[in-house]
Image (cartoon, coloured by chain):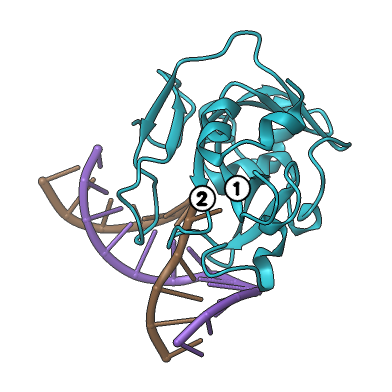
Chain colours: A cyan, B purple, C brown
Amino acid sequence: MTLRELLSRSVHDVAPALVGWTLLVDGVGGRIVEVEAYREDDPASHSYGGPRGRNLVMFGPPGRLYVYRSYGVHWCANVVCEGDGTGAAVLLRALEPTHGIETMRARRGLDDVRLLCSGPGRLTQALGITCEHNGSSLERPPFTLLPPEQRPAVVVSRRIGIRKAADRPWRYLAAGSQFVSRAA
DNA sequence: CAGTGGATGCTCT
DNA sequence: GAGCATCCACTGT
């Protein structure tokens, strides 16, 4: 299955399926170990209420990156999926660093590998993702998405850091990973 | 450990 | 003017 075919499916299929893939930006990054699903009929989603303003990329074709500023200070990155204007995307919440660790240490200003990419704001800082990448295709440089050699076991839990629709079990983690932002 | 509060920009009311 | 899909430093056990 191609990346495009994978991302064209329901966000509830795409989100767990992305766990284990390796995301690189200019060769720097790691293995995806934590994501969350968001969709249009979801009060916690930026796409809730239909396309307007900053959320337009969420209603575009699958395989693009939706980047927004969080709490005025951080960037958060989502993989747009489904397509056909459904407004669904997968929030990238944590990576296990594998490539370019020294570059990520320098960008983050710390040494502990477990803290480099264990949170949505940390991850974008470590990989150098900013609003300049909003709307960019993940199928082209500087991005690389590599499939896992073996599909990892995935654990489901409730989403983190939201007040609305906080009870929906739409957070997906690599089982047993030490690099998630919070244990399941 | 846990809990609290500040930084800071953008969207929405 | 409020609220936010966050992170970090600081406080107190």
Closer to us: A140 or A130: A140
Q: Quadrant of residue A68?
A: bottom right
Give the CA distance from mark 2 to mark 1. 5 Å
x, y percentage for residue A144?
80, 29
Determine the residue located farthest toward the right in the rendered image: A141
* Amino acid type assigned to the residue bearing label 1 in the image: Ala
The picture places residue A176, in percent across and down from the top left corner, at: 40, 18
Residue under label 2: A38
Mark 1 neighbour density, 10 Å: few (under 14) some (14–19) many (20 or more): many
Q: With A184 as the anchor, is A35 left or right in this view?
A: right
Residue located at (70% from left, 52% from top)? A84
Q: Say whether mark 1 and mark 2 are on the same chain.
A: yes
Where on the picture, by quarter, is residue A146?
A: top right
- In the image, A139 versus C4, the foreground residue is A139
* Rendered location of residue A71, percent (x, y): 53, 65
User: Which residue in the structure is indicated by mark 1?
Assistant: A89
Please, is residue A179 above or below residue A122 in the view? Answer: above
Residue appearing at x 72%, y 44% in the figure: A62
**Tag of residue A49:** none
Residue furthest front as drawn: A84
Q: At label 2, which amino acid type do we have?
A: Tyr
Measured along the vertical axis of the image, is residue A153 above or below residue A31? above
Q: Secondary structure at mark 2?
A: strand
Q: Residue at x 59, y 50 (%)?
A: A88
